[in-house]
Amino acid sequence: MSESSNSIPTPSTRKPPLVKSSAIFFGLTNLAAITIVPYWGIVHGYSAEAWIAAAILLTLGGMSITTGYHRLWSHRTFKAAWPVRLMLAFFGGMALQNSIYVWAARHRIHHRHVDDVERDPHSIRTGFWHAHIGWMLRNWPTSEVDFSQVRDLEKDPIVMWQHRLYWPLVWTSNLGIPLLLGWITGDWIGMFLLAGVLRLVASHHFTFFINSLAHTWGRRPYSEDNTAVDNGAIALLTWGEGYHNYHHAFQADYRNGIRWWQYDPSKWLINTLAWCGLVTDRKRVPSFRIRRARLVMEFARLQRRIEQGAPSTWRERLDHELGQFRDTIGQWQAVQRRRVEAGADALKDRWSRTEMHTRVKELEYRLKMQQKRLRALTRSLEPQAA
């Protein structure tokens, strides 16, 4: 974009025209969710079937966004058979967050220009409200769709099918399914209000939390290059997307919660589908790179604390650890060069493959032990900080 920044209307300058359709839609659905839905529940009550249907449809829609729209199509972190892609496309459309084609185009721009108020569609630097929902309520230039970002998706017939028939799918899923279930159970209104209105509003805000809360409230253990944070509480509301600092640091990984105990149902679904033979080519960031990123952050934080005032012995220890860290990284890079130079033939040789693999594991262990030492050094500095 060749225009000067002064010519681009941003949330910090003048406001562009309101998108009336979006404002009316979000206004009415949210108003209904906090007035009509509880009123009907108090006066008439809701059936167990309506609650169960709302929970199931909420799960199907949310998981289709995180697993399909986000990890499969936006980041290409795994490959899936056509029945899986078809289900994710259908129930992703039910979440009413635009087509895969549009959603992925905007999301890739977000990652490429995160926190840039003139490029990121929902930069948190423009304010919490704007990042959460405001970016969809006005014709911001940052919200314009650049389809050059998703040329690869044009080769997926299911993506293009969903894009062409997006609105019929939206009406069929958001009205047709709740009303059909209402006809089956005899609870038309209750099913429509819970499985239709409340489910859709909750689904929207759970996803919007990723743009707002997941760039505001939490820790940054892997990178401080952007505002993305890790927060297990947010992960509970966003189908595992709350480990957002990790995701922005390693967006090619199909996982967000990399620990076994971290809540990441999208990861579990992908692994289950892989076990069934419906998912292949899952991408994982090597453990060494993850440990390296965490250590870089710990070194940076320790350096800042020591610069605030600490005995020379602490500085010497930090310099010693930093030298060892650089040596480990250098050895790891040497192994990677050997692997590339040796080519595919060496990887077919069992001894060569095992030798390089065990060498990397040894270097990973060195980083693990160094991380323990750095944490001990950090604890030793607590009295100094006090």
Image (cartoon, rainbow, N blue to C red):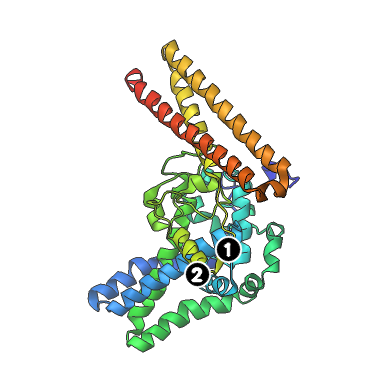
Q: Is residue 139 visible?
A: no
Element class at badge 1: strand
Nearer-the-camera pick, 201 or 366: 366
**Could you tell me residue 138's position as x and y percent?**
57, 57
The amino acid at mark 1 is Thr
The amino acid at mark 2 is Cys
Taking the image as shown, residue 325 lies to the left or right of residue 44, namely: right
Picture disc at residue 215: none
Q: Quadrant of residue 69?
A: bottom right
Q: Quadrant of residue 199?
A: bottom left
**Could you tell me residue 173's position as x and y percent?**
49, 78
Taking the image as shown, residue 353 lies to the left or right of residue 233, namely: right
The residue lying at 49 percent from left, 27 percent from top is 299
Q: Is disc 1 surrounded by few (<14), some (14 to 19) or many (20+) residues within 10 Å?
A: some
How far separated are the C-alphas under marks 2 and 1? 10 Å
The residue lying at 45 percent from left, 44 percent from top is 216
Q: Is disc 2 surrounded by few (<14), some (14 to 19) or many (20+) residues within 10 Å?
A: few
**Could you tell me residue 206's position as x and y percent?**
43, 59
The residue lying at 41 percent from left, 69 percent from top is 58
Name the residue at the right extreme. 2
Taking the image as shown, residue 75 lies to the left or right of residue 29, namely: right
Element class at badge 2: loop
Seen in the picture, residue 14 relative to 30 is either above or below; the reply is above
Picture disc at residue 280: 1
Read off the residue under disc 2.
276
Q: Is residue 219 visible?
A: yes
